[in-house]
Amino acid sequence: ETGVTQSPTHLIKTRGQQVTLRCSSQSGHNTVSWYQQALGQGPQFIFQYYREEENGRGNFPPRFSGLQFPNYSSELNVNALELDDSALYLCASSFWTVRGEKLFFGSGTQLSVL
Amino acid sequence: AQKVTQAQTEISVVEKEDVTLDCVYETRDTTYYLFWYKQPPSGELVFLIRRNSFDEQNEISGRYSWNFQKSTSSFNFTITASQVVDSAVYFCALSGRTGNQFYFGTGTSLTVIP
């Protein structure tokens, strides 16, 4: 148990729709990262939030956006869904102190786009 | 560029056999961090070990051991006397000097046959 919880666990959407995924960080953590994991692949970095500001972004289009709230919980929003957005979305929290801090992952949200 | 390669896609071993999972990384950073994570069918990535680039000492934790060699840019993971509960997908990951993004390999799916 990492203390990182994600909701919902599964979601089915149709192409063109919008989706919001939610994450509650482990207590005491001030940084949250989002990763996309396609079937049979390793997780790919979407972005990270630290103290409610974006702190790095991977190679994802602007229709992927996020928020971090004062209680350090977070949302991932995806607009204009495409079939290739079907994946497991993982949230990870950490405490931003020194470099190389390990990430604590949630169990993910499985998104299917039809 | 940062990259992690796990050439072994799937490995099957019989219970109690030893197994080594290979990881090769690429980075131009002089300071970096290497990780191994385990992903059981539940989807949550479970942290196993972190190693920084200045610490080449091998590490043993119970049945797990890690061999870090900067000369060959490798960070291999050995499970001794494998058990059925070790069946999972194992990911090697790299975090560079900025520390905000993890680069994952494509994972090695390990099946331990009773």
Image (cartoon, rainbow, N blue to C red):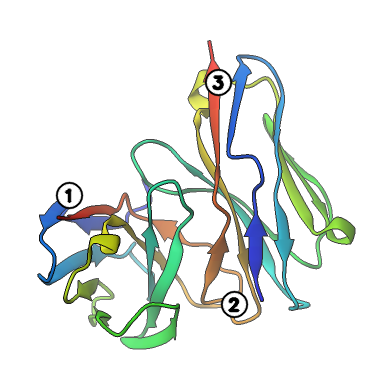
Labels 2 and 3 share a subunit: no
What residue type is disc 3 on? Answer: Val
Residue A26's image quarter?
Answer: bottom left
Residue located 44% across and 69% down the image: A45
Residue located 27% across and 63% down the image: A85
What residue type is disc 2 on? Answer: Val
Mark 1 lies on residue: A10
Distance from the alpha carbon under mark 2 to that under mark 3: 37 Å
**Residue A84 as seen in the image, left or right of residue B60:** left
Within 10 angstroms of label 1, few (less than 14), some, or many (20 or more) residues? Answer: few
Measured as percent of width and height from the top left, residue B109 is found at 53, 36
Asked if marks 2 and 3 touch (Cβ < 8 Å), the reply is no
Mark 2 lies on residue: A98
Measured as percent of width and height from the top left, residue A100 is found at 61, 70
**Image quadrant in which the N terminus of chain B is located:** bottom right
Measured as percent of width and height from the top left, residue B24 is found at 73, 55
Residue located 64% across and 66% down the image: B3
Camera-side mark, 1 or 2: 1
On screen, B4 above or below B66? below
**Front-lying residue, B87 or A29:** B87
**Residue B100 as seen in the image, left or right of residue A78:** right
Mark 3 lies on residue: B112
Q: Secondary structure at mark 3?
A: strand
What residue type is disc 1 on? Answer: His
Q: Secondary structure at mark 2?
A: loop
